[in-house]
Amino acid sequence: MTFLRVIGFSVLLLLGYMGFAHMLPQVVPDTSEPVEVSTEGLDMDGFIALGESIFKGKGTCTLCHNGMGRAPDTLEMDMAATYPARLADPRYKGVAAGKEGPKAIEEYIHESMVAPSAYVVEGFGKKGTNDTESPMPTVNMPPIELNDVEMNAVTAFLQDLAGLEPTVPLPSADDAPVAEEPAAGGGEPAPLLTSGEAIVDEYGCASCHDLGGSGADLGPSLYGIGKRMTRAEVIESIIDPNAVIAEGYEADFMPADFGESLRGSELLVLTDYLMALPDAAPAADDSKEEPLATTGLEAIDKFGCAGCHDLDGSEADIGPKLNGIGKRMTADEVKTAIIDPNAIIADGFEADMMPDDFADQMDDSELSLIVDYLMNLPE
Ligand code: HEC
Ligand code: HEC
Ligand code: HEC
């Protein structure tokens, strides 16, 4: 601990000197925008490698899935034995319940990503929920927001790691491109990030803190932090999080290596950004919101429905198939099923699986577009 404090102090000194450089006009272009790459023609080995880079990079999975006890240490554990044990656990009631084999494990992994609370590994649930609610973010929703191809790549990687032949399909020519993070390593230094949002994005802060509308609550809210902490205290809590533990939270939870991975100027820009945050999270309909969807399919994409329902070719089966729903339900019933999913539970499915906050997230126009689209879905 003393050792860490000494490092922390030296970094503070160093930052004092760097303060000047920070005040020079920024000439470095912000190259932090992800680059879209097509996955066409990738073979399974390439797809597995893509999955590994997403797991360790863009997906921010290793923020929690590491040896610190925040989540199962998926990369180090003997998952060849663990996955079958999960499926056989009497507490497991998810989509692959009662099944075994590589395909069932694919379904289990996919479900862990799109509906983390469907099954919570013992001891890892949110505090006070008795392992019924998972603290893991839904990965096809903001802030992580992986698309189907990216989730398949991660699944291929995890299956391969467990010694299984991946069962996910390879991406086809008309699949969406994958957003590749700006090149890191490979000789070229990663581009310097020059906006607070880009840094929060790159380092995954919003997976644990409520930032950019993520609503995450694994760490304390950082809104209004400029009023309760000094700039130096904020810097210390980023580079040496265990020096002072925020009340009501545990030590060793926030990654302790940001001091190494953040560049000096990035740390300063990030700190300025945090210090200037308003006292409370902006209202949901603020300007940083995603634009309104203008077609039913766009809206379905925006709200991640295809992660659980077989829509737009996703073949997901965590929720019922919606094809032909117009023949068995009225438009009003479909609307209720979306905004108040627990009012009536579809036969053969469980309550509390479908998110119940779409009413708050959707504009009325988006809700009508979705209802129209579903009512007209052919059988
Ligand atoms: C903020 C922390 C956090 C992040 C980020 C996170 N997870 Fe998790 N994950 C957890 C926790 C905690 C559990 C255990 C509780 C549960 O079963 O939901 C878990 C469980 C899982 C499981 C089931 C593991 C098992 O042992 O059965 C899989 C698979 C998984 N996560 C994959 C991912 C992938 C892939 C990503 C990145 C795209 C990711 N997670 C990102 C916290 C996280
Ligand atoms: C894996 C989850 C996790 C991630 C990722 C994470 N934090 Fe934290 N953070 C926490 C937890 C838990 C605490 C409270 C415990 C503590 O003080 O160490 C915390 C505390 C803090 C505090 C002190 C807040 C206070 O009220 O005392 C700041 C500032 C902070 N984090 C900033 C960041 C920034 C900036 C990033 C991204 C570079 C980040 N965190 C990433 C979990 C996380
Ligand atoms: C995390 C998984 C999940 C997501 C995301 C999800 N659903 Fe569902 N949905 C379910 C499950 C499970 C059920 C069945 C249980 C129930 O009725 O609540 C269901 C039920 C439904 C029903 C009723 C179907 C019937 O046959 O009664 C409709 C309609 C529906 N969802 C539409 C949507 C739409 C539209 C979206 C996106 C805005 C969406 N769902 C997102 C899991 C999900």
Image (tube, rainbow, N blue to C red):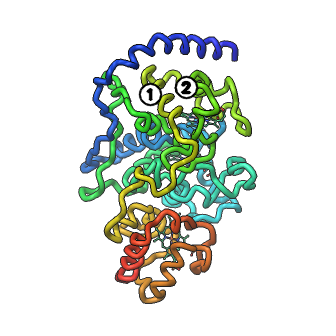
Residue located 54% across and 48% down the image: 281
- Residue 194 location, x and y as percent? 37, 30
| Mark whose residue sits in front, 1 or 2 | 1
Q: In which quarter of the image is the C terminus?
A: bottom left
- Residue 62 location, x and y as percent? 53, 38
Q: How crowded is mark 1: few (under 14 residues within 10 Å), some or many (20 or more)?
A: some
Q: In this view, does 213 lie to the left or right of 22?
A: right
N-term mark: 1 or 2: 2
Q: Is residue 373 left or right of residue 38?
A: right
Q: Is mark 2 on a helix, strand or loop?
A: loop
Q: Nearer the viewer, residue 51 or 68?
A: 68
In which quarter of the view is residue 364 placed? bottom left
Q: In which quarter of the image is ligand 2?
A: top right
Residue 257 tag number = 2
**Relative to 15, is 142 above or below?**
below
Q: In this view, does 91 lie to the left or right of 259?
A: right
